[in-house]
Image (cartoon, rainbow, N blue to C red):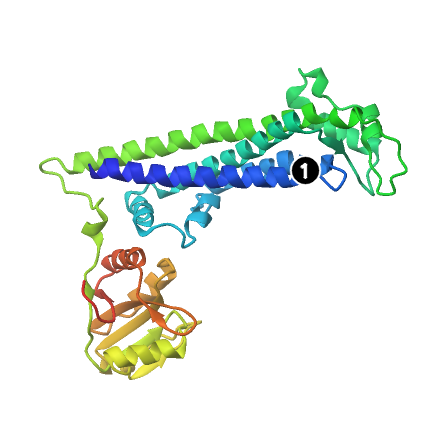
Amino acid sequence: MNITNSHRTLSQISFSLGFVGFVVGFLVGYGILVGDAQGRVNLLFLLMLFAFLPVVSLILSLAFILMGARKGLASWILELPLLPQRLSAEIVKLEVSGNRKTWLFYQTQLLTLSFAAGGLLVYLLLLVGSDISFVWRSTLLEATDLLPVLNVLALPWSFWPAAQPSLDLLLQTQDFRSGTQATDALALGLWWKYILAAQCAYNLLPRTVMLFVSRHRYLQALRVNTRATVISAEPGNPVLATDPDQALAPVVYSVTSPYILLDWANSPNFCHQHLGEVLGSPSNILAIEPLPLPSENEQSHQSTIVVLVKSWEPPLGELGDYLASLAAPSQKFVLPMDWNETDVKPVKDIHLREWRRFCNTLSGWQLLQLGGTP
């Protein structure tokens, strides 16, 4: 039942991303295709939107997956504080199960394909409901310079003669702001087939293929991790901590004074004042960048160290290495805090769970919060 609910929640996130991509693609396409005051659309801008940018983004997507990067367009969007807490929690669970990377790559392809579909739909609607006038303008390029480039771009649809460029068509549709050129009104609409073919060849079809590939990789990773979980749950096998609650460190709400405050977050003074009101004033506050390591003599006289971190930033390996180097204190705490310009705010549950999971991987470290109940 929990697995079914999790899949349903992830499907809601996928639908939301797809809807956002479709709407943005529709609006961006409309904004370009309505053209200038005379209704003229620059052919070079259309090729930039429907051919150049899709190819560049596709190359970047392949580079991300080949280099093992966890970031992508979908990841950046989902990191914005816009999702409800329930949906954000499911993304955290993906990190625990090891499926986050393949799922985010899948969502990036869904997002970009939806963007392409929105742009294609508004293009077709405007073709039917209005007369789009395609022209091109350039200070540096002549028609003879542009034709070889357009011919190379048209190679994927060489089987469609009506969608091929020609020198005569380029000469007839070149536009000058002075307005002295004579253009054939019928010729201005002949580029629609070329632009349609470019959208399909460089945007819609590659993204469709990438969507199927990324979906296959995600489902394959999901099956592998699910099989490992089932095997580990059989009698005689240790149970894997696939449930995030099984890997969360407990939360404590008090410390033994005096304590040293290591401010990894470079927090404002009102955070220190609030901390002093709740826990008592620290015996020393050490700044960051780089964080100084307390001397062995200082550590031996202090039994407690509190490391203040930004709750909304994910734990980094650099922080883990630094905490591992603090071996002397008998009590060691990580304190995630959240604040705005003037006040300290409650830590969001999704962020608290991630820091609890981080503390659970560290020997001798506990998660500290300022008052409240677990």
- The reply to whether residue 324 is visible in this rendering is yes
Q: Quadrant of residue 189?
A: top right
Q: Nearer the viewer, residue 304 or 46?
A: 46
Q: Nearer the viewer, residue 151 or 46?
A: 46
Name which residue lies at 72% across and 17% down: 162
Q: How many marks?
A: 1
Name which residue lies at 20% across and 51% down: 245
- The reply to whether residue 299 is visible in this rendering is no
Q: Quadrant of the C terminus?
A: bottom left
Name which residue lies at 30% across and 48% down: 86
Name the residue furthest right. 180
Q: Is residue 127 above or below residue 57?
A: above
Name which residue lies at 21% across and 39% down: 2
Q: Quadrant of residue 204?
A: top right
Residue 352: horizontal and vertical position, in percent?
28, 59
Q: Is residue 118 left or right of residue 248?
A: right
Q: Is residue 368 above or below residue 177?
A: below
Q: Quadrant of residue 323?
A: bottom left
Q: Is residue 349 above or below residue 239?
A: below
Q: Is residue 163 left or right of residue 239?
A: right
Q: Is residue 285 left or right of residue 23?
A: left
Q: Is residue 347 left or right of residue 20?
A: left
Residue 280: horizontal and vertical position, in percent?
25, 82
Q: Nearer the viewer, residue 69 or 300?
A: 69
SS at badge 1: loop
> The disc labelled 1 sits on which kind of residue?
Val
Residue 37: horizontal and vertical position, in percent?
75, 42
Residue 209: horizontal and vertical position, in percent?
49, 27
Give the residue at mark 1: 34
